[in-house]
Amino acid sequence: MSELEARVLPEATLARLTQYLRALNALEAQGLERTSSGVLAKEAGVNPSILRKDLSWLGSYGTRGVGYVVRELAEHISRTLGLNQDWKVAIVGAGNLGRALSGYAGFTSRGFNVKAIFDVDPALIGEPVGELRVESISDLAPVIDREEINIVVLAVPGDAAQDLVYALSELSVRSVLSFAPKPLKVPAGMNLRRVDLSTELQILAYLAVQG
């Protein structure tokens, strides 16, 4: 592993790299082969100086007066984010949220392949969800092993999420995205990200009142 690959990028920089990648893909779709930091920053909605500082973490990929090669920079950001690997996703929870997530086209287009969806409700087991069928949560271990799952999305109530985190840790799943509306204890070696939709709505409500 090189010195660059061994660096741990700041979380804010990681979040912005996803914005730059989206902007680069849009520029490439427009037929542009090169772009400047000013144009890329505008497309990504950030300040050009912040963009240049973020990209400095990745090494020198721009040329003064010439700018960035769009495809080259997009590929380098993709490698940095690990998007050149094969990510196989399982969703736990086949309710409205889980079903919606399983059909989200943005997963596949970015290299995340949903391979399984689980639920605890016997009435849902075997039901079709897109090209998948709902698996029983009791089959979590063999299905994760069979499909070589390396990312799990939790679309379950908060009370169920914590036990699932511990169970997934025992199955050597190291990456979890949780939509459960509560903080979770994270075992050593696991990376867990939380998406709390109700909190985000409350923040929007506050900002609307203030505005």
Image (cartoon, grey):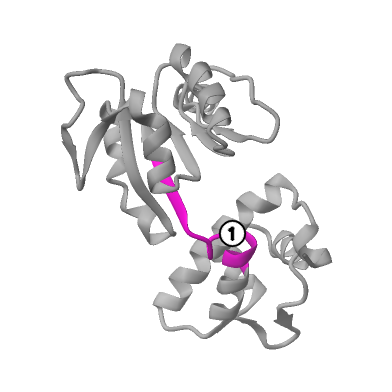
Q: Is residue 45 visible?
A: no
The furthest residue to the bottom: 66
Q: Identify which residue is drawn at 32% across, 30% down.
A: 118
Determine whether the residue tagged by mark 1 lies in a helix, strand or loop.
loop
x then y, percent, for residue 183: 59, 19
- Front residue of 8 and 14: 8
Read off the magenta span: 77-90
- Front residue of 177 and 201: 177
Q: Identify which residue is drawn at 35% across, 47% down.
A: 114
Q: Is residue 58 left or right of residue 43?
A: right
Q: Identify which residue is drawn at 57% across, 35% down.
A: 193
Above or below, comparing residue 151 to residue 188 in the picture: below
- Front residue of 126 and 28: 126
Q: Identify which residue is drawn at 38% across, 47% down.
A: 147
Q: Is residue 14 left or right of residue 131?
A: right
Indicate the quadrant containing the N terminus: top left, top right, bottom left or bottom right. bottom right
The furthest residue to the right: 3
Q: Is residue 130 magenta?
A: no
Mark 1 neighbour class, 10 Å CA radius: few under 14, some 14 to 19, many 20 or more: few
Above or below, comparing residue 165 to residue 53 in the picture: above
Reading the image, the residue beneath label 1 is: 82
- Front residue of 73 and 158: 158
Q: Amino acid at mark 1?
A: Gly
Q: Is residue 88 magenta?
A: yes
Above or below, comparing residue 40 to residue 70 in the picture: above
x then y, percent, for residue 189: 68, 35
x then y, percent, for residue 79: 60, 66
Q: Is residue 135 visible?
A: yes
